[in-house]
């Protein structure tokens, strides 16, 4: 393996285009490929000769490792590794605040190693780190995750610098920061929904646009389509069979197929707003699908504002799902109607309303006990 020495010139250096130019004061860096991964690291010197020696030493270390020899010299102690790491960071563009956090994280690592009698950085194991992590004093998952990122960065450095033969954090499981999706789901109350529809005519939209917006909103409310899928509904996707209508689409976002029956009155209303466009119901003339979606989004906002309701187009989709759940429709069916790729996603969003279904089940069970 070859370790290349090169200059990382400052943008103000006249030799900025020549990484092989040695006689300026810019930082010298090392570059090498290991296991198919390119690594670049500071040589921690401005002298080309010193950097060359370090590169050579690195090459030797890697070669010894490949040949199964022990790395010459004593293994690196934990405090030495921490000092090397922090020095390398001080040379970079890291803010003092971030450096301080690294210092704090690593002093905790040091305390852990002292308590466990770990002297060399190579003796820190994945299971040791997992035990240590369980004792971290953080309240929030985000703080945990940031701390873990700093720990990983330290061990990555140790590995790349040849201080340890393997990176114990490579297999350290990630820390999940749970975003409470359910808390962000809000459907429209039936009264709000009625008010929104009634407001369309009072917003100053051209009557033709008003009719399109109203039909599109109702389509979302009764089919569960997202704004993109609703606005981009093609004529073929509105299937009429006698008096019954359905929308049959492939979701633009996920590619999942949706095939939902819609009320007859809505099907008729959709036929009425059709315009000259050969392919689409809502997209007119020269508009691109993307442009049309943004136009509808703007018109929607105009309506929500005029109605004095803090709304988004997606709340119409939520209204569709929640009203189904409230009516006792099984969540697996709701999931299918929404075109979710798995019912787990549906449950994550709508667990709160699925409880209503649980209550119905509870009621059914309780009434079955009655003689
Ligand atoms: Zn330079």
Image (cartoon, helix red, strand yellow):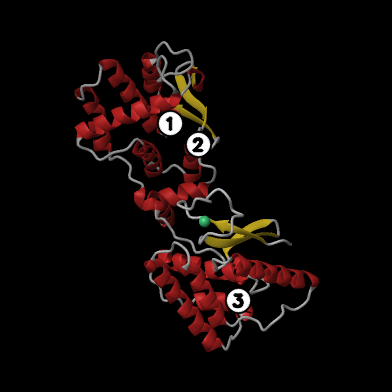
Residue at figure coordinates x 36%, y 16% from the top left: 273
Q: Nearer the viewer, mark 1 or mark 3?
A: 3
Is residue 171 at least partly visible in the picture? no
As drawn, the residue found furthest toward the top would be 276
Instruction: Kindly identify which residue carries mark 1.
Output: 228
* Residue at 64% from the left image edge and 70% from the top image edge: 54
| Other-residue count near label 3 (Cα within 10 Å), few / some / many at <14 / 14–19 / ≥20 | few
Q: Which residue is mark 2?
A: 253
Where does residue 60 sit, x and y in percent of width and height?
73, 71
CA gap between label 2 and label 1 equals: 9 Å
- Establish if 30 lies above or below 104: above
Dot 2, how many residues are within 10 Å of its Cα: few (below 14), some (14-19), or many (20+)? Answer: few
Query: Farthest residue in the right direction?
Result: 67
Residue 325: assigned label: none
Mark 1 / mark 3, whichever is N-terminal: 3
Residue 286 seen = yes
- 67 or 148, which is in the foreground? 67
* 310 or 33: nearer the viewer: 33
Question: What is the crowding at mark 1: few (fewer than 14 residues within 10 Å), some, or many (at least 20)?
Answer: some
Q: Quadrant of residue 36?
A: bottom right
Q: 63 and 112: which one is in front?
A: 63
Asked if marks 2 and 1 touch (Cβ < 8 Å), the reply is yes
Left or right: where does residue 37 sit relative to residue 25? right
**Residue 340 placement (x, y as % from top left):** 51, 41
Residue at image mark 3: 127
Q: Along the line of sight, which residue is nearer the eye, 176 or 229?
A: 176
Q: Quadrant of residue 119?
A: bottom right
Q: CA distance from mark 1 to mark 3?
A: 47 Å
Q: Is residue 321 above or below residue 155?
A: above
* Mark nearer the N terminus (2 vs 3): 3
Q: Quadrant of residue 262?
A: top left
Q: Residues at badges 1 and 3 in contact (C-beta under 8 Å)?
A: no
């Amino acid at each position: 393996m070859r370790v290349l020495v090169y200059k990382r010139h400052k943008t103000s250096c006249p030799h900025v285009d020549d990484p092989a130019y040695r006689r300026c004061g810019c930082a010298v860096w090392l570059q090498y490929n290991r296991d198919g991964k390119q690594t670049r690291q500071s040589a921690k010197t401005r002298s080309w000769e010193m950097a060359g020696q370090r590169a050579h030493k690195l090459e030797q270390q890697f070669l010894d490792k490949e040949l199964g020899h022990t790395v010459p010299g004593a293994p690196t102690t934990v405090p030495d590794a921490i000092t090397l790491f922090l020095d390398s960071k001080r040379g970079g563009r890291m803010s003092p605040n971030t450096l301080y956090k690294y210092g704090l994280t690593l002093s905790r690592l040091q305390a852990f190693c002292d308590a466990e009698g770990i002297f060399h950085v190579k003796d820190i194991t994945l299971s040791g780190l997992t035990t240590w992590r369980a004792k971290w004093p953080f309240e929030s998952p985000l703080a945990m995750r940031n701390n873990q990122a700093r720990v990983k960065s330290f061990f990555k450095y140790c590995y790349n610098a040849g201080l340890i033969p393997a990176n114990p954090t490579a297999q350290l499981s990630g820390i999940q920061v749970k975003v409470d999706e359910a808390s962000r789901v809000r459907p429209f109350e039936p009264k709000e929904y009625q008010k929104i529809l009634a407001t369309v005519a009072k917003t100053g939209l051209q009557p033709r646009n008003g009719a399109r917006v109203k039909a599109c909103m109702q389509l979302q409310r009764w089919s569960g389509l997202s704004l993109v899928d609703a606005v981009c509904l093609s004529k073929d996707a509105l299937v009429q069979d006698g008096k019954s209508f359905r929308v049959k689409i492939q979701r633009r976002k996920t590619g999942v197929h949706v095939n939902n029956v819609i009320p007859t009155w809505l099907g008729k209303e959709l036929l009425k707003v059709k315009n000259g466009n050969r392919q689409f119901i809502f997209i007119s003339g020269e508009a691109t699908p993307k442009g049309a979606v943004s136009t509808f989004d703007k018109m929607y906002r105009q309506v929500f504002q005029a109605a004095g309701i803090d709304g988004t187009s997606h709340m119409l989709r939520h209204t569709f799902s929640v009203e189904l759940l409230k009516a006792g429709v099984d969540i697996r069916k709701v999931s299918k109607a929404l075109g979710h790729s798995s019912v787990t996603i549906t449950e994550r969003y709508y667990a709160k309303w699925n409880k209503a279904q649980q209550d119905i089940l509870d009621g059914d069970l309780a009434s079955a006990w009655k003689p």
